[in-house]
Amino acid sequence: IKPILNIKYICWEKGGKSLKMSGFFTETQERLALPLMIQSNWKLVGLSLLIASGIWTGSCRNNQPPPLEPSRAKSTLPAPLTFKAATVLVHYLELKDALVASDSGKSNRSAAAMRSSLVSFVQDSTFVTVDVTLSSAVRSEADTMLVQLEGLLSANDASCERQRLFFKPLSAAMYHLLQEIDMRRIMVYKQLCPMAFNEQGAYWLSLSPAIENPYFGAKMLTCGELTDTLP
């Protein structure tokens, strides 16, 4: 009998030690694994197996992932680019969490890491194999994010208020980028704070439907609403 849930294989690394997670995961557990491991300072080293290698219905043998299921549609980007896009998303989420906590030091570190991952993403030689229209759209959003990250890093504001000005267009570009890329089974939530910036409103992305507002932090932590989900 074929199992109802899909078998996943995820690799993490911390302090020279590696951790492999394999077995049956519900969609909720799958979405929670990423932020929980990040909060525990584990580095994701095998997300490509989860995102780019498809859904598996066999078992792992000799530490090798099972083969792709033939009926699974391929990602719109090659596996190396999908993995790098996921890395960009990881650092974006770290930046979002830093703004929720109003931690300017962490926000700067996360923004710098996101900038580095974006540069690696757009400069990857694999882009030559990507459809021209898709490549142009992806590069355009990445360029927008790089501009906003430069502004955020130069803000130098301990209260994080100036950083949040750049986080708004950064989030919009991140959302548009994810619309262009098949991130497989990673569920991303688009959330809105209608009161941000004198009630102009501002969006952000999260892996959880629970509201934690990066524009107000502790002042109005739960102010916001869910407006969209990806994929």
Image (spheres, rainbow, N blue to C red):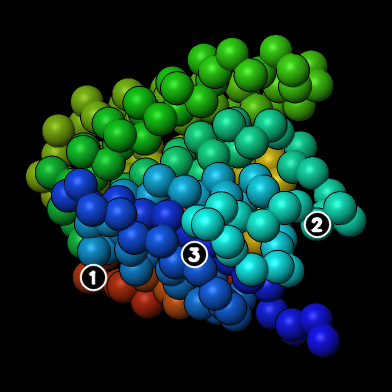
Query: Residue 64's spot in the image, x, y percent?
Result: 56, 53
Residue at 82% x, 86% y: name it: 1
N-terminal-most mark, 2 or 1: 2
Query: Residue 14's spot in the image, x, y percent?
Result: 23, 52
**Pointer 1 local density, CA inside 10 Å: few below 14, some 14–19, many at least 20:** few
Residue 63 in sight? yes
77, 61: nearer the viewer: 61
Identify residue type, mark 1: Lys
Numbered disc 3: secondary structure: loop
CB within 8 Å, label 1 to label 3: no
Identify residue type, mark 2: Glu
Give the distance between the C-alpha atoms of the residues marked 1 and 3, in whole angstroms: 22 Å
Numbered disc 2: secondary structure: loop
For residue 134, side relative to residue 177 (left or right): right
Residue linked to disc 3: 207
Query: Residue 101's spot in the image, x, y percent?
Result: 21, 61
Give the distance between the C-alpha atoms of the residues marked 2 and 1, in whole angstroms: 48 Å
98, 5: nearer the viewer: 5
Query: Residue 231's spot in the image, x, y percent?
Result: 70, 58
Residue linked to disc 1: 219
